[in-house]
Image (cartoon, rainbow, N blue to C red):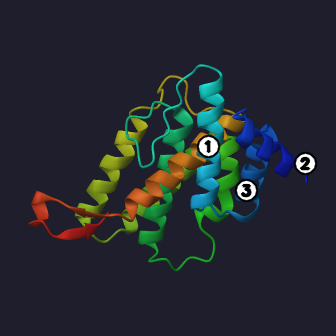
Amino acid sequence: PPLGGAVSRAVLAGGPYPVTLLSAVLHRIGADGRLNYARAAILKAFLVRAARLSGQKEDVSMTLDTTNPSIAYRLGRLFAVLEKVQEEAYDNSLNTTIKDRFFSSASANPVAVFPRLLRLHAHHLDKLSHPGRKTNIEKLVQEICSHLPADAGFPAHLPLADQGRFFIGYYHQRQDLFTKKTTPENGGQEEIA
């Protein structure tokens, strides 16, 4: 296939990955809603190689980067947190989640989706039974939103590369939400985020 040949040439020659690779991965994520390690790795490889070859620095880490300045990356993180709150509010018993309905459109047209998701988020927070959990989630949402430009609002459209950053931010935040953490407050006991 032409895509396979173009990717092989890019790997062997050290050239840029074809944009069709990025487009194909984004299309698959949009079609089936699955973002796994392999897809996230391809997105990261595309972005890092494109930046390196253009003389720019693409700062895509292996794990969650709370200092990443990319708006798209932060929106992906925000989507992951909003999804997690919905899951907890309904005890994973929903037939259709915000990811099922809005994942693809949130990555391409944030302004059309995020205002609605934030309104839903307020209702989902009210359904959480543990007050400490509500506080922790609110702090996390505020931390993510504090680095979004307040005056510009949500972007109307994200280009393909930024859609890749969105999905990487989502993937990193989801991984972090399910990582066991030890804190001095819980006596060194492990807890799920």
Three-letter code, disc 2: Pro
Point out residue 189 in the picture as x, y percentages from the top left corner: 15, 70
- Can you give x and y, in whole percent of width and height, for residue 111 in the image? 63, 38
Type of amino acid under label 3: Gly
Spatial distance from mark 3 to mark 1, Cα to Cα? 19 Å
The residue lying at 69 percent from left, 52 percent from top is: 104
Residue 1 position in % (x across, y down): 91, 54
Residue sitting at x 72%, y 33%: 16
Classify mark 1: helix, strand or loop.
helix
Query: Is 71 on the left or on the right of 129, as rendered?
Result: right
Q: Residues within 10 Å of mark 1 (few under 14, many from 20)?
A: some
Of callouts 2 and 3, which one flags the residue occurring earlier in the amino acid sequence? 2
- Judge by depth and name the residue closer to the eye, 25 or 162: 25
Q: Nearer the viewer, mark 3 or mark 1?
A: 1
Q: Residue furthest top?
A: 55
The quarter holding residue 185 reads: bottom left
The disc at residue 30 is: 3
Residue located beneath label 1 in the image: 45
Residue at the image point whose x is 8% and y is 66% from the top: 187
**Label number found at residue 2:** 2
Q: Is residue 96 above or below residue 152?
A: below
How many marks on residues? 3
Q: Which residue is at 63% across, 46% downward?
A: 43
